[in-house]
Amino acid sequence: MSQASDDDLILALADSVQARDATVQLHRRYAQRFMSYLMRRGLDHASAEDAVQDAFVRLLQRAPGFTPQGQGRAWIWTVARSAWLDELKKPVLVTETLESWHENSTQVLADVAGTSNYQDCVQGQLQRYVQAYPEAGQAILWAAVDGLKSAQIAELIGRSAGATRQFLSQARKRLHDYLEPCVGLNSP
Amino acid sequence: MRSDDEKWIDALAGHDAPASADEARMQQAVRKAAASMEATQGEADMLAERRLLQRLEREGLLARSRAQRWRPLRLAQAAVIVLCVGLSIELIRVEPTRQLAQDAEPLKPVADVADMAAAPAEFALPEPSSARAMAEARAAKQAAQAVKAAPPAASASAPLRDQAAGLSTPSQSRESVARAAPPPDIRVPVADLKNAWRELQHVLDSNTGLTEISRDALRDRISLRCVVQSGCDSLRDWLHSLDDTLPEPQVGEVMHLRLEPRS
């Protein structure tokens, strides 16, 4: 089961015999990511851990209704987010206001001069970006790490179609702003 | 119709081709940096994992682990083992009971037939090896029957065990044992102890209907039982040859004889 896909693991969650192993596997894959996401959204460690548990409770509850279509990752994030929205009762997952995007762009350039390596620069800037804009950063991570399509990300962030287009446009532009100082640097 | 931004996101996700070489380079670097950021940090948090599994079990979403599932059965097994060990100890404790009973000679419970059968061999009289083997076999058989047929043996010995364990006073134990005390030994006056034992052994060897249950050579004591009338007759004849006032053995009845030199 160590090489199982997310789809396989979700199916296994619905099987009483395999559910324990599948839960452990999924926890090892996602718990840290859930924790990072929730803590970026302002939760302390203990609250984030409770929220992660809530997410796994919801995953087990919803697993019998899952249809494997190779979109297990998107499903996992969707179910987890729905659990957090229901359980947290806090404005933790409130969407970022677009106004906050118009900050002073000089802040973006901070610390870039410290490196001459393109990849290191991108890494550092992406971290700053994710810290500064958790939701937009999460959208980038969903695409870059999980391979989620724009439509799936739109579903996850829970905005209307028009608002999602605007959100993705702003997220992309802002990321470009952050990565712009790295463009002239050489790859190792 | 997808916007440019949506296409850009899909390209970052690997579902579309990047718009340019620069975009491709940048997206590749972002993917690498993002993967590095999201990589599992060190060891899995085992504590969090255990807490999660416990909660899921509590909420009935996960079956108990195999070890927990088998716990009731293991407890039952342990209980059976404890019971068996306890029973064995009870049976083994009959040995100290016998010792105590010997110390308190007049109060010795006759119910300890099994103990008497298991009396140490060094107390037995010298006898032909075949006869000894037969006697031992008979004694073991009789002891087994006696233990089976006489459950009060354990209860009769219980006070002595309690006394040994310091659970009751000696006077209480003596009273308890006295209540369960067997009939006194039949005193058999003999002219010569050695000859008398030899004669008795001959009677035993020549009558299959007469069985020896136990023998205490130190105190010239023997427990016998005739299982058929012919055995009783032989024993009666021998007893009456010594003293015709001695009681007649009855079939199935255990007789405890104490050979005493005539004064």
Image (cartoon, helix red, strand yellow):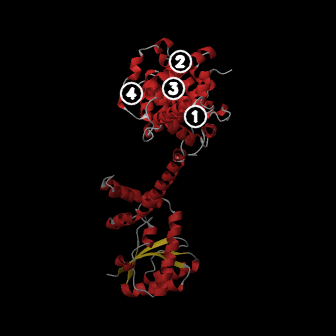
Mark 1 vs mark 2: give the one in front: 2
Residue A31: image x %, image y %?
Answer: 49, 34
Marks 4 and 2: CB-CB under 8 Å? no
- Foreground mark, 4 or 3, reads 4
Q: Nearer the viewer, mark 2 or mark 3?
A: 2
Which chain does the residue under circle 2 lie in?
Answer: A
Quadrant of the image containing the C terminus of chain A? top left
In three-dimensional space, the C-alpha distance between marks 1 and 4, rounded to whole angstroms, equals 49 Å
3D distance between C-alphas at marks 4 and 2? 22 Å
Distance between the alpha carbons at the discs numbered 4 and 3: 22 Å
On the image, numbered disc 2 is attached to which residue? A170
Residue annotated with mark 1:
B61
Type of the residue with mark 2: Gln
Q: In which chain is the residue bearing label 4?
A: A
Q: Secondary structure at mark 1?
A: loop
Q: Secondary structure at mark 3?
A: helix
| Vertical placement of residue A71 versus A101, above or below | below
